[in-house]
């Protein structure tokens, strides 16, 4: 047979070459199937998808639009089955509705969009003979959470005047979740979901605090404010304060009320990933995806209870409501220079330095205290960006996913890009964000002091500077660059059981399609980066889950290219010509049934 591909264990596959195929392209010897598509019925009573006869009622029982984060959880006692949890970040009306008029959306279209946002929980089953993973329709745990599902606000800001509205005088109950980008899976069996670009749903603001969050002064693109005044800041000023949080869902209890944890701060949460301290308390990393914004860490003060009993589950659902939220400040240990491809290095030969976690707010069972001068604890939780500004946190190149490596404890921070770095009056390159007009992004590697999850100090260094490896300003942890794949705009990250980092991309600025990559983080092949798959026209690669025998990706917004519409599609994935393009989840496995990349 053909020579076995070399590489670190877990990454022994023939890399997929950069391409512009309107398809999901996987390595030789691998197979794929579409697990679930936008509109597929998952709840009892939901009709089959019919793009020409959509309704809000149908969509509320069907898989949502624009899948991003994915979790694949165990279903004990159910042979060959797992529980898939997916985020539905946003809607693309021109690609969803034939004849869509952006100036005059109909109420039905708006309500379909509300129902297409949110989360899906759906059982999936493996066919042992073919390897395919398919939906278990009407499973008792299947669930949809949408832009109108009831949520409970928890933490220091819950019940505060800042969160009270005419529909909710308690400030503790909010309808819906919006723009859930990436997320995380907790060791206590729940999922976390980051509310990211929530600003785009709110109209007619004139407040400085809203401006810091990018909330506009005029109408929104989707015009939801015409159909529900809570999206009009001039009429319902506090509704916007109820979005931009980390959401927690118990996918094993379909009747549970999901929560929004105000102690984890309010900003454009990309994701939220969890590890435990040595004594069993939760630590959550979360980034604010905006040019020149910050990344954060929450350290809990309560220990996780083991076991799946009701009391333990209830206790664990309160773990993120007591503890301290910190923001990161990074300092280079050499005078800052730009990585410019001339081989010039900082004085100590490395782009590296130290960092501190600056406390912003602490909460316990009795109340909360602010560590930020001039701001109350409630204000820190609701206007967290302003708190970060006040304490001098480090302005980063769009912090996307941040995730600790379960094998080593090192923490990886994906910084997707920042074309404004060093442009005009914007902050110039520094040792942690070393490239001006940063088109391709980079990844930092953090080491918490003594490798303790709750440390307040850390060291950091550059792990990867993305781009075409022929570009001398790129860097792959020192691995020979002729042996790596080109990569641009790292976004979501995940780890496999070998400790390799898997990176999905969004916005490839090299002219080819986005994709999924694996890179070794330790050993002599550290920095060897290989492309595992590419996604169709206009799509972003999301939600990677890497199990021993299967990789799952969410193909988000296929066909999203300027000027495209239902009538004039830019992609015909996944169902071919004449069919509407549909965001979908794809599973990839080895034809011979063996583990991925061994
Ligand atoms: Fe939704 Fe920052 O990506
Ligand atoms: Ca240095
Ligand atoms: Ca993302
Ligand atoms: Ca992104």
Image (tube, rainbow, N blue to C red):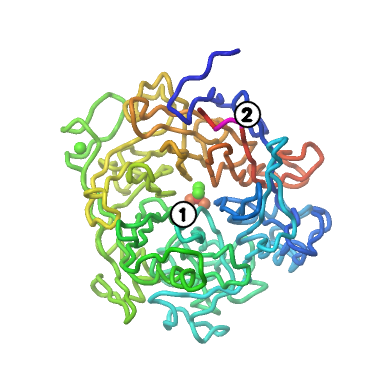
Among numbered discs 2 and 1, the one appearing first in the sequence: 2
* Left or right of 381 on screen, residue 314: right
- Where is residue 331? Give x, y as percent: 21, 47
> Spatial distance from mark 2 to mark 1, Cα to Cα?
30 Å
Report if the beta carbon of the residue with label 1 is closer than 8 angstroms to ligand 1: yes
Marks 2 & 1, CB-CB < 8 Å contact: no
Q: Which residue corresponds to mark 2?
A: 30
Res 348 quadrant in image: top left
- Badge 1 is on which residue? 270
The question of residue 205 being in magenta is answered with no
Q: Secondary structure at mark 2?
A: strand
Residue 485 screen position, x and y as percent = 47, 26
Tell me the residue at 38%/22% (across/down). 481
Classify 10 Å Cα crowding around label 1: few (below 14), some (14-19), many (20 and above): many
- Residue stretch rendered in magenta on the structure: 590-595
**Percent x, y of residue 551:** 57, 39
What residue lies at 72% left-to-right and 40% top-to-bottom?
574
Q: Nearer the viewer, mark 2 or mark 1?
A: 2
| Prevalent SS, magenta region | loop
Name the residue located 66 percent from the left edge and 35 percent from the top edge. Answer: 32
Which element carries disc 1, helix, strand or loop? Answer: loop
């Amino acid at each position: 047979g053909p020579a076995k591909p070399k590489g670190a264990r877990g990454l022994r596959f023939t890399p997929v070459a950069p391409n512009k195929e309107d398809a999901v392209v996987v390595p030789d010897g691998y197979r794929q199937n579409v697990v679930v598509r936008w509109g597929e019925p998952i709840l009892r009573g939901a009709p089959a998808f019919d793009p020409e006869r959509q309704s809000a009622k149908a969509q509320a029982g069907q898989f949502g639009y624009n899948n991003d984060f994915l979790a694949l959880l165990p279903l004990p006692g159910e042979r060959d089955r797992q529980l898939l949890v997916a985020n539905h970040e946003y809607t693309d009306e021109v690609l969803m509705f034939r004849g869509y008029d952006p100036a005059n959306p109909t109420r039905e279209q708006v309500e379909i969009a509300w129902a297409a946002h949110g989360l899906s929980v759906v059982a999936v089953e493996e066919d042992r003979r073919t390897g395919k993973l398919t939906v278990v329709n009407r499973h008792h745990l299947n669930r949809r959470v949408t832009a109108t599902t009831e949520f409970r606000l928890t933490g220091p800001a819950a019940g505060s005047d800042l969160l009270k509205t005419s529909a909710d005088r308690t400030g503790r109950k909010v309808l819906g979740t919006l723009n859930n980008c990436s997320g995380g899976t907790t060791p206590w069996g729940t999922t976390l979901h980051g509310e990211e670009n929530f600003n785009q749903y709110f109209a007619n603001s004139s407040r400085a605090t809203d401006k810091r969050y990018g909330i506009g002064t005029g109408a929104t693109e989707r015009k939801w404010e015409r159909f529900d005044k809570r999206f009009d800041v001039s009429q319902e000023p506090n509704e916007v304060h109820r979005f931009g949080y980390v959401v927690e869902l118990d996918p094993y209890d379909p009747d549970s009320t999901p929560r929004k944890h105000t102690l984890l701060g309010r900003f454009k949460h990309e994701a939220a990933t969890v590890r435990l301290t040595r004594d069993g308390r939760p630590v959550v990393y979360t980034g604010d995806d905006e040019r020149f914004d910050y990344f954060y860490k929450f350290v809990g003060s309560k220990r996780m209870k083991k076991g799946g009993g009701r009391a333990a589950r209830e206790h664990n659902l309160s773990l993120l409501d007591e503890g301290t939220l910190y923001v990161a400040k990074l300092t280079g240990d050499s005078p800052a220079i730009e990585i410019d491809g001339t081989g010039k290095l900082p004085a100590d030969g490395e782009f590296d330095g130290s960092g501190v976690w600056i406390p912003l707010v602490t909460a316990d069972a009795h109340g909360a205290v602010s560590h930020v001068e001039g701001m109350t604890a409630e204000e820190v939780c609701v206007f967290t960006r302003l708190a970060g500004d006040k304490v001098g946190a480090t302005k980063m190149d769009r912090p996307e996913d941040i995730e600790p490596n379960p094998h080593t404890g090192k923490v990886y921070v994906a910084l997707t890009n920042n074309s404004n770095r060093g442009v005009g009056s914007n902050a110039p390159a520094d040792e942690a964000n070393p490239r001006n007009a940063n088109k391709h992004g980079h990844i930092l590697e953090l080491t918490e002091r003594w490798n303790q999850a709750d440390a307040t100090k850390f060291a950091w260094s550059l792990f990867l500077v993305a781009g075409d490896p022929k570009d001398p300003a790129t860097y792959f942890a020192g691995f020979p660059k002729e042996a790596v794949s080109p990569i641009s705009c790292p976004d979501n990250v995940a780890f496999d059981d070998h400790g390799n980092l898997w990176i999905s991309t969004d916005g490839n600025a090299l002219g080819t399609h986005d994709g999924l990559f694996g890179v070794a983080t330790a050993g002599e092949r550290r920095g060897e980066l290989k492309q595992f798959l590419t996604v169709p026209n206009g799509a972003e690669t999301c939600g990677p889950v890497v199990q021993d025998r299967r990789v799952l990706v969410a193909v988000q917004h296929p066909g999203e290219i300027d000027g495209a519409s239902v009538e004039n599609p830019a992609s015909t994935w996944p169902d071919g010509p004449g069919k509407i393009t549909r965001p979908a989840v794809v599973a990839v496995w080895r034809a011979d049934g063996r583990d991925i990349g061994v």
